[in-house]
Amino acid sequence: MASSTQDPAVARSLADALRAAGDDVLADLLVARPDLINPVPGDVSALAARASTSASVMRALDRLDRWHLQVVEVLAALPDPARSDEVEALLPDSDPEDVHDALDRLRTIALVWGDDRELRLVRSVRQAMGQHPAGLGPSVADLPARATVRTPTRAAELDAVLAQAPEGAGAALDQLVWGPPMGHLEQARRQVDPAVVRTPVEWLLAHGLLVPVDDTTVVLPREVALHVRGGRVHAQDEVRAPQPTVTASRDPELVDRTAAAAAYTTVRWLEDVLEDWSVAPPVVLRSGGLGVRDLKATARAHEMAEPDVAVLLETAYAAGLLAAADDLEPEWLPTPAYDLWKARDPAGRWAVLVEAWRDMTRVPGLVGERDDRDRALTALSHELDRVQAPETRLGALEVLAALAPGQSTSVEEVTQALAWQRPRRGARSRAGLVRWALREAEVLGITGLGSLTTAGRAVVRGDFTEAAELAGALMPEPLDHVLLQADLTAVAPGPLTTELAHDLRLMAEVESRGAATVYRFTEGSVRRALDAGRSASELHTLVELHSRTPVPQPLAYLIDDVARRHGHLRVGTAAAYVRSDDPAALDQVAADRRAGSLRLRRLAPTVLAAQSPVDAVLERLREMGHAPAAEAPDGAIVVRRKDSRRTPPRQRPPRLVVDATTPSRTLIDAAVRAIRAGERASTAPRGRAVAGPSGSTRRLPRTLANETVELLRAAAAEQRSVWIGYVDNHGQTTDRVVDPLRVERGYLTAYDHRIEEVHTFAVHRITGVAGLDDDQT
């Protein structure tokens, strides 16, 4: 809305200013303030009214940086209307070109209207700035009139009066000059004789530099405050964002390699955690979330710090890989989306996590903090959503992206930069959100050694495909082999393929993690694989196929021994029974005191009946050193231990949304056309009789079907209104003036001037099309 194109005689309101502006200006407004487009305003007046509402204005102000807010505060401090040179005078540190650019931007987003001679702040913007913009009190003209004391307002008068001020008067003014401008004073309205003042404050009252507004309150008038401030509204004009101080500079290649290793480790860590939860999931707390003990146990089992576990779990939850199963006792389980995620290469898996993390409103750093009722916040709970998190997270990365590759800065410097970008939004929680965001970025491998990586710069741009390619090029290739040892261990000298890692976790226990992972084969771990449906031959094949060293005899013997005893006892449902082809084995079980709780009773030489559930009988017999198997009614062995469990299909958890998303350019263009069409609605012809250019009445248009479609498409492309005849649902033919938007699949979508909204018409019901200027008498 350039000032040079506006005529103050015409622009009597914001609506007039928008009406006189070009379509590109309206489009820029809708892009900058997307809340204005839903629903599309009927005309320019409706657009101006919506842009002036308090809610919309507050959202627009929240998106301004400190410089533009300073310009708004200056306008709020000036009487309405103001001139651009008056604004420049109150911003003495600024280049006039910067002031003009800021004013143009404020016009574009409809917070200010008018040209440089008559700048007007939208009323709701002035209200949002409050009674004391930039800490300034009311103008002398707005204060109660006083019969005996006049407040000096001109610079020469103020200089002369202040030159006579007694000691202490300047200090009293300094307490109010930068705000708040109100002060407490007993008997503020008392009459003071300038010749017999006893205190500096009385001297200020006597000379009108402080004005009482009630019996106990005095105020520093705006003109006096501006003079004492040196003719400026702000202590410093902050035109540019503060440049962060570089705290360290490292080799960019080292940064990228370090971050890629962290990214790969993060992906494998998450896979390990969710694989374990597939088999032994933790329960969901009654209040939602994950128990503190379960978080600690997961961190301990996987040799991770608890905050890092919280980051992984929250990111997986936001990405839809983890959810609560809807059972009688809900548990945290991987979703079917986890299997699709696991099928990707490591870089692709990392990109999914990073995209979810960048845009999620979840704040893992809050885990362990106390809420307003002094209760600890738990991972995966509903209390961890914060609307400012995505903007703060992306803003922190953008600050790092502005530095040279390999350079890093402190959390405090990043926080200051974000405070300049969005001073009104999230000030109380900004420091914590920045600190957590930078830590999480390091854990996920977006940053390395405190610096943003090359892949991280792609993340900032939103190009996650490129980010995956850049990070993947530095990730280690997964191995498909291990080194078997004679002490029943297997050493993985590096990260394993997903399939091999899964099989080894099923068949062996993870003894230690690190650069090399050590797995230990035990009787229990081998039995676990057999319980999951693996056979002894499959286990032999697995270790033989993936070992770079010969299979030690102790491991082969262990597999054969456990497999030979596995299923020797069979447990089925009676309530439960224990069966064996070897009566001696049942004699041993029945004589064991540890089986007393099962209340076994002999039914036959090869069958014992139990009064406990099948799972309880299986567990107790395993504790006694046996290797029982569950049995189906037909005698077949039942796989009691599922290899993995999943939730039903789940949608990703909802995000809190504070700002409307930026609409597409197609929608913006259509909205501008609809708004302009609404402006023509009041003068457009309506009804069956439509006046032609010579004053005669036009008949309903008639065109062939193919011609109708071509004319409508041409009108949509040229963005012009047309006149159509249309047969409605009652068989009545009426004329309509419409602005075609698109023609597809036998339907016309157009702005209908009769009902003043976008409507869909069946093309086969359109009798004909004619231009508004066609002469059809």
Image (tube, helix red, strand yellow):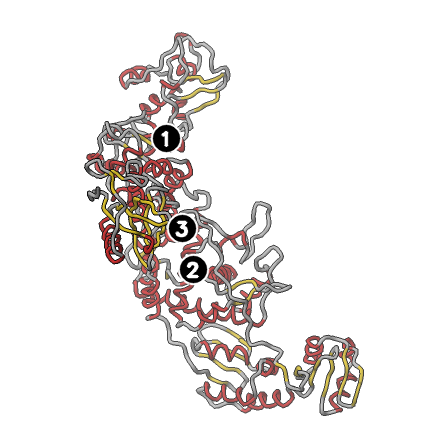
Residue 500 in sight in this render: yes
Nearest the camera: 164 or 364?
364
Q: Quadrant of residue 575?
A: bottom right
Q: Amino acid at mark 1?
A: Arg
As drawn, the label of residue 736 is none
Quadrant of the drawing holding the N terminus: top left
Question: With respect to residue 772, does 588 lie above or below?
Answer: below
Residue under label 1: 123
Question: Where is mark 2, residue-wise?
Answer: 356
Give the class, few, some or many, for how many residues have Cα within 10 Å of label 3's Cα (few <14, many ≥20).
few
Label 1 to label 3: alpha-carbon separation: 46 Å
Q: Is residue 483 left or right of residue 465?
A: right
Tell me the residue that label 3 is attached to: 729
Residue appearing at x 26%, y 54% in the figure: 708
Q: Which of these two is toward me, 457 or 4?
A: 4
Which of the 4 image quarters holds residue 41?
Answer: top left
Tags 2 and 3 in contact by the CB under 8 Å rule? Answer: no
Q: Amino acid at mark 2?
A: Ala
Q: Position of residue 87 (x, y in %)?
A: 27, 30
The residues bearing labels 1 and 2 have C-alpha atoms spaced at a distance of 40 Å
